[in-house]
Amino acid sequence: MPRRRVRPGLLAAVVSSIAVFGVGAIAVPAAGAGTTVLPAPAAGGLPGVAPAPAAGSLTGAAATPSPTVTPTIPPGTPDTSPFPPGVPTNVTASQVRTRSVTLTWTAATRGCCAIAGYDITYYSPFDDVVMSASVGDVTTTTISNYITPGRQYSFRIAARDVVGHRSLSSEPVIVVTPVTDTGPDTTPPSAPQNLTIGAVTDSTARLSWSPSTDDVGVSGYNVYRFDGWFTSFLVATVPTTTYTVALPPPPPPSTPLRYQFYVRARDAAGNVSIASNTVFAPTTPTPPTTPPPSTCRVTYQNQSEWQGGFVTVVTVTNTATVPVDGWTLTFSFRGDQQITSGWNATTGQSGATVTARNVDWNRVVPADGSVSFGIQGSWKTSNAPPTSFVLNGGPCTVG
């Protein structure tokens, strides 16, 4: 069975020089089950540098390919080609059932060498286990290991060639499985949109969101609290699109994580939707409408940029006269960038909005001191940098 992966905040206790990726490290299940591995960053690294090959042959998929023959590379043949395969495109979930998901895609374009097969990574949100499966040179497969009814999954596919080069990962495909394959209603509702939190007091906050739709009818909404690690709690089931939630006590100072809330719509058959965006539980009441003066400065510098990818270092300087103990930086991309990995911060993205939180070793920013973290990502039409940043609820100057 898959074991829980090491969370970014814990990696610092082992070795602080490791770049902390958002998905963390994950372990290997028992023989015969889908293997859990550390997935390569979706952006695939810098041009001209071959990504590391997938870790072993994985068996997480019930695939439907015909037998394939992998060309044999003579022992000792050096892997010197800089041309990995192209990214698999048009990835879709052609069939979603209670315990299986069938994926189809357009074959990747070969680089230097013949395509050997495809690696598929998938996970459920608000969990800390990532599964993976490998198939041959095919364009469809059915994933059944660890697929359960009424659960959300995100899938990505990467191509690999006969010498071990690995492509960038595809855009994610997100599905939610029905609770039954035979009932009169097997279609989940649409996801609630625009979840926000407001009217904050010392003990409560008001959640609100846009309504979902369903082919039969939405019967209500499940409101969840996520502990930031791997556990979600059902807080309430409500018939309307607002709920006043009791705020939990803040996590201990030793952890960089904060509680979050999200919502799923449900129908009368018990089908649940894909999750809404998440919002963080505030640690203080709603601040005054007049923003305080800026006590921080942010620089956003692209270290490397190429067609479809970038690497950026963000530096946050504390311009106040007192230390900052625990920090959360938010900003919004002005292009269509998607973060694929990061280091020295715990990063998350919802739409264009990015949230970066401190890790254990850089939690405190001294007065007139600074911290830096890095992100790697992909883009299609624009890599326009953000123009405003907010640190712990207060605006920062830029530059």
Image (cartoon, rainbow, N blue to C red):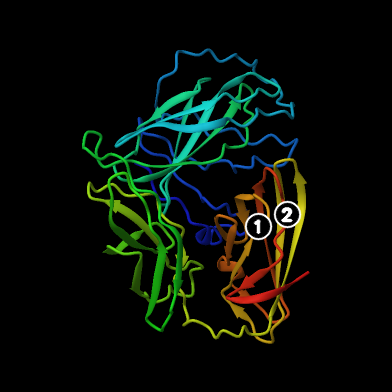
On residue 152, which mark appears?
A: none
Residue 179: x and y in percent read 26, 42
Compare residues 301 and 195 and report the one nearer the observer.
195
Residue 124 sits above or below residue 89 on the image: below
- Element at label 1: loop
Q: Give amino acid for label 2.
A: Ala
Compare residues 109 and 190 and report the one nearer the observer.
190
* Local crowd size for mark 1, using a 10 Å CA cut-off: few (<14), some (14–19), many (≥20): some
Residue 60 sits above or below residue 217 on the image: above
Residue 32: x and y in percent read 35, 30
Q: Quadrant of residue 99?
A: top left
The residue that mark 2 highlights is 384
Q: Give amino acid for label 1.
A: Phe
Tell me, yes or no, whether the two marked residues, 1 and 2, touch with CB atoms within 8 Å: yes
Task: Name the residue: 75% across, 35% down.
Answer: 48
Position of the C terminus, as image quadrant, is bottom right
Answer left or right for 368 relative to 234: right
Residue 228 sits above or below residue 249 on the image: above
- Element at label 2: loop
Label 1 or label 2, whichever comes before in sequence order: 1
Task: Name the residue: 57% across, 52% down.
Answer: 21
Answer left or right for 219 relative to 324: left
Answer left or right for 249 relative to 115: left
Residue 398: x and y in percent read 75, 70
Residue 281: x and y in percent read 44, 71
Would residue 50 be visible to someone looking at this image?
Answer: yes
Would residue 18 be visible to someone looking at this image?
Answer: no
The residue that mark 1 highlights is 333
| Alpha carbon separation for disc pair 1 and 2 | 7 Å
Task: Name the residue: 61% across, 79% down.
Answer: 324
